[in-house]
Image: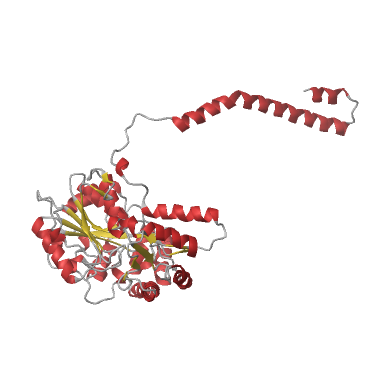
Amino acid sequence: LSTAKTLVTLPLSIPVMKLSIAVLFMTLVSSVNSFNMVQTSPVRQATSLASATATTGVKRNKNFAKLAGGYLFPEIGRRRNAYLEKNPDANIISLGIGDTTQPIPSAILKGLVDGAAALGTKEGYSGYGAEQGKAPLRERISEVLYNGLIDPSEVFVSDGAKCDIQRIQNMFGPDVTSAVQDPSYPVYVDTSVMMGQTQELDEGKGQYDGIVYMECNEENGFFPDVAASPRADVVYICSPNNPTGVAATRAQLEQTVKTCKERGSILVFDAAYAPFIRSPDVPKSIFEIEGAKDCAIEVNSFSKYAGFTGVRLGWTVVPEGLKFSDGTPVRQDFNRVMTTSFNGASNIVQAGGLACLSDEGMKEIDNLIDYYLENAGILRKTFTELGYRVYGGTDAPYIFISLDGKSSWDTFSEILEKAEVVTIPGAGFGPGGEGFLRLSAFVPREGVIEACERLKKTMKR
């Protein structure tokens, strides 16, 4: 204000006076703002402090407190990012998470584009659809992927197999016992814990009390003897398996179905990697096994079929004749879960799903699968020639490598630091995965070749 007073008392020309008035105005505004900041700052600080420290009267779900650490794949991402922060010029190649990398093929892409364009026309616009999925898509899934073994009414179209596993758990609730392969995809265990099916984590074993862990190792071909395991209400089997890459034989699945029927268990069969099966004697669906419709649910996804990991489209098959112990159809309750918590898969995405199941779309899918299997073959050959025991990579996109007892997390860190290649430690899939490393074939070809050259040096024996 003293500056303003000085300016006013000077003899000024008209232009200078205008400038001086402007300066005076800005000075006053600045003074007022400074005053306001001083006045309001403590309030803002108090609000910020309260937000940072405030708690509610709501108790945390005790089951979430049981979960061990973070989910595996975000943890891998965290460690990768931490390495990049220290080494910003690093050229990292990821053989880690099973995320597709090739573009969506043209015929399938056209289905998505046409589905989106239709929404801009009077004739093609559609709003909410059936929560179970569009009838034409359910029919094509039944015809093309199951050869009519299941009825379209038994197909529930969704936004992916992972989401459906959680929905299945919601349907079963907390009062069931689940059995999982060890090692296995972490979602089966984590959702069981979230639902309250387990007790605390046994730190010594690295396993939750209340879950049946079915041992999968080199001696049993990485497929469990379900009959020799304690009975469970719900048995989760993934084939081709993540992480081991091993596909179950017909005889193994026949024995599993037989055991589940005898025990009154429900088998949840995760067939997300079915399109990678090239061996003619290996079943792609549990419903190829006689009696499976009496005891099994199957989950599947277009993610690996057509590069839909970011598009999101899957399905679950719940046979009409499958019933709970009180005679209630399982399909009835799963339908209730879907209609209550899901508004149906995107209309655009379902149009893409129909394109996948066209003759041209299926050819494009075969070409995509062949590409990734060739990558798997390169990885498998590299580690076989290095002298490692290698599993998977023939009917699956994953390679499972024995480290002869060496820590899988230590090996992960060593490879990241020395070769700048991201892998997945087997221990992340359960205690049965310790001493193994999983590699993914979902990488551009040049990345696979370069990664193998680096790994030949880092992993040389």
The image position of residue 58, as x and y in percent, is: 33, 31
Near-viewer residue (145 or 179): 179
- Rendering quarter of residue 287: bottom left
- Rendering quarter of residue 243: bottom left
The N terminus lies in quadrant:
top right
Asked if residue 194 lies left or right of residue 113, the reply is left
Asked if residue 292 lies left or right of residue 107, the reply is left
The image position of residue 313, as x and y in percent, is: 34, 60
Q: Is residue 110 above or below residue 166?
A: below
The image position of residue 181, as x and y in percent, is: 24, 58
- Rendering quarter of residue 155: bottom left
Residue 149 seen in the figure: no
Asked if residue 193 lies left or right of residue 79, the reply is left
Q: Is residue 454 above or below residue 312?
A: below
The image position of residue 84, as x and y in percent, is: 52, 56
Near-viewer residue (32 or 127): 32
Near-viewer residue (299 or 454): 454
Q: Which residue appears at 67% of the width and 27% of the height?
A: 34
